[in-house]
């Protein structure tokens, strides 16, 4: 095998391995972000469900405290 062919094959191998690593990292990052978004959504739903009655009464108190505006 000539030097040029060996250099070409080595360069091709290095470039291929670098691009394969980037693709794997992007896929893993997307999955991780998806899991984080899902967990945050579940946490928000649980908090709103647990505090739903308190929030309703709080908003009603604020609405009652606002002055009536005539159209």
Image (cartoon, rainbow, N blue to C red):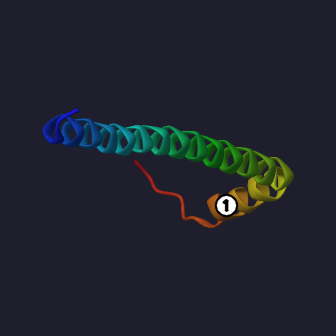
In the drawing, does residue 5 fall left or right of residue 71?
left
In the drawing, does residue 60 fall left or right of residue 4?
right
Q: Which residue lies furthest to the front in this view?
A: 1
Could you tell me residue 39's position as x and y percent? 71, 47
Q: Which residue is drawn at 74% across and 62% down?
A: 58
Q: Residue at x 68, y 58 (%)?
A: 59
- Decide which of 13, 27 is in the foreground and name it: 13
Q: Residue furthest left?
A: 4
Figure quadrant of the N terminus? top left
Q: Residue at x 40, y 44 (%)?
A: 22
- Decide which of 8, 3 is in the foreground and name it: 3
Q: In this view, does 65 lie above or below 39?
A: below
Q: In this view, does 26 lie above or below 44?
A: above
Query: Crowding at label 1, few (<14), some or many (≥20) Cα neighbours within 10 Å?
Result: few
In the drawing, does residue 31 fall left or right of residue 70?
right
**How many dots with numbers?**
1
Residue 9 falls in image quadrant:
top left
Could you tell me residue 60's position as x and y percent? 71, 56
Q: Return the residue at label 1.
A: 64
Q: Residue at x 52, y 46 (%)?
A: 29
Callout 1 secondary element: helix
- Decide which of 25, 14 is in the foreground and name it: 14
Could you tell me residue 45's position as x and y percent? 74, 45
- Decide which of 70, 13 is in the foreground and name it: 13
């Amino acid at each position: 095998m000539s030097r040029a062919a060996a250099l070409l094959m080595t360069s091709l191998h290095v470039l291929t391995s670098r691009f394969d690593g980037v693709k794997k990292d992007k896929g893993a990052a997307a999955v991780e972000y998806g899991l984080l978004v899902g967990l945050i959504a579940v946490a928000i739903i649980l908090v709103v469900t647990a505090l739903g009655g308190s929030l309703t009464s709080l908003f009603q108190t604020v609405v009652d405290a606002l002055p009536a505006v005539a159209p």
